[in-house]
Image (cartoon, coloured by chain):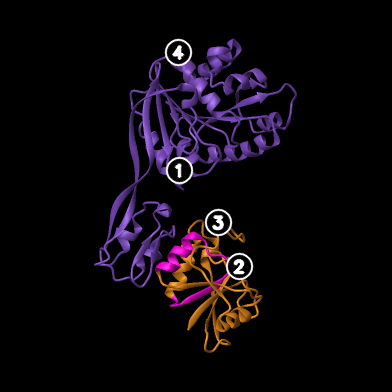
Chain colours: A purple, B orange
Amino acid sequence: MKITIASGKGGTGKTTVAVNLAVLASSEMTGVAYVDCDVEEPDGHLFLHPEITSQSDARVPVPVVDEDRCTHCGDCARACRFNSLLATKKKVLIFEELCHGCGACAIVCPENAITETTRAIGVVRRGRSDGLTYLGGVLNVGEHMATPLVAQVKEEITDDLSLSIIDASPGTSCPVIEAVRDTDYVILVTEPTPFGLSDLRLAVEMTRKLEVPFGVVINRAMDATNDLDTYLQSENIDILARIPLGRYIAETISRGDILVDVHREMRNIFQSLFKFVASK
Amino acid sequence: MKIAITAEKDSLDAPLDPRFGRCAWFIIVDTTSPEKFTAIENRAASAGGGAGVQASQTIIDEGVRAVISGNFGPKAYDALDAAGVSMIVVEAQSVREAVQAFNDGTGKLLDSPSAAAHAGLRRI
């Protein structure tokens, strides 16, 4: 089973929920993995301190032009939807960072002058933190595209893993869609602020389009009813847990400690959340 | 000589568009008869990425030898430089004035990008 933790707004508590759920689950069953798909800014490892057992390059395809065969007709540049090829009268320039690896240029070239090579965009890492499997990706600094790396990290989820908790990046664009796609359930983490609600609406719309069932965890929840509660009720969205607003929680997190290991009431909250997840 | 000027509208009296990659129009003139012109709409203006690359491809396909604009970003610079197209920045309000400045030799020839990626109207 694959559960994705997403949000919309950044900083609402995805990693907090993902890490603590994974740690709690790992104390109740075997075959649990924490999967860090926030490849631009991974931070699960700051809490889990995994021992990394293997690391490999994540590579994407890019074109190579054989200038001896090239007649500079420009068909490749015209075919490219991502503007990564420029055909001057003397040579073809390739802007590799824009290339999406679709292969259209190689297909349209009338001289068969284009072949494929690969370039590294980041790394995929595998490790362990006590009984918990750790999987994650780190995108190279300056890289534009996180999505192919997110896909490669998810490919590391092997069949022997019974429960994988995927920590997505914030937002609702391509890397998040890649993380959420083809998973079994999404937990949307939100907070009772105007920005939190505004971004939650977008995340809900995205998740519904991807046709993955979902529920909401409210982080920094307060007692009074507010626009967030009203919205969730009117949309018939399940509230899976409420994590209270508390300075002690922020202090624990800022020390890099795991909430369920330090605070009884946090363990209880995540125990209920795990029971719900296990029932799915 | 065939040159292009980035413009906000498709006329010689149009204001100079200070951005190259996402300008509205390219006005193409022969400097020896500057009252005759061709206007090409810049389809790169709405590109998700690589606008400078796509705009440069248009320039190259038209056989233009020099481009007058305000800001050339890093991809546009590399593209036009590879194609041997000169990049020139002038002080001018309209396309007509820009062509005049070019003919008078008062423009500045660029040897590096004038702006960072996605800089809009900001200069380095």
Asked if the residue at tag 1 contacts the one at tag 3, i.e. Cβ–Cβ closer than 8 Å, the answer is no
Marking on residue A141? 1
Viewer-nearest of discs 2 and 4: 2
Give the residue at mark 4: A27
Residue that extends furthest to the top in the rendered view of this protein: A264
Image location (x, y in percent) of residue A263: 58, 12
Residues drawn in magenta: B62-82
Subunit ID for the residue under disc 4: A
Q: Are labels 4 and 3 assigned to the same chain?
A: no
Asked if the residue at tag 2 contacts the one at tag 3, i.e. Cβ–Cβ closer than 8 Å, the answer is no
Asked if the residue at tag 2 contacts the one at tag 1, i.e. Cβ–Cβ closer than 8 Å, the answer is no
Q: What distance separates the C-alpha of mark 1 from that of mark 4?
A: 35 Å
Marking on residue B18? 2
Q: Quadrant of residue A192?
A: top right
Q: Is residue A29 visible?
A: yes
Residue B75 is left or right of residue A93, and the answer is: right
Give whichever of discs 3 and 2 has the lower sequence position: 2
Residue that extends furthest to the bottom in the rendered view of this protein: B33
Q: Is residue A280 visible?
A: no
Three-letter amino acid code at the position of disc 4: Ser
Residue that extends furthest to the right in the rendered view of this protein: A224
Name the residue located 60 percent from the left edge and 83 percent from the top edge. B100
Asked if the residue at tag 4 contacts the one at tag 2, i.e. Cβ–Cβ closer than 8 Å, the answer is no
Give the residue at mark 3: B118
Subunit ID for the residue under disc 2: B
Q: Is residue A245 above or below residue B84?
A: above
Q: Secondary structure at mark 3?
A: loop
Q: What distance separates the C-alpha of mark 4 from that of mark 3?
A: 48 Å
Three-letter amino acid code at the position of disc 2: Pro
Three-letter amino acid code at the position of disc 1: Val
Name the residue located 50 percent from the left edge and 36 percent from the top edge. A41
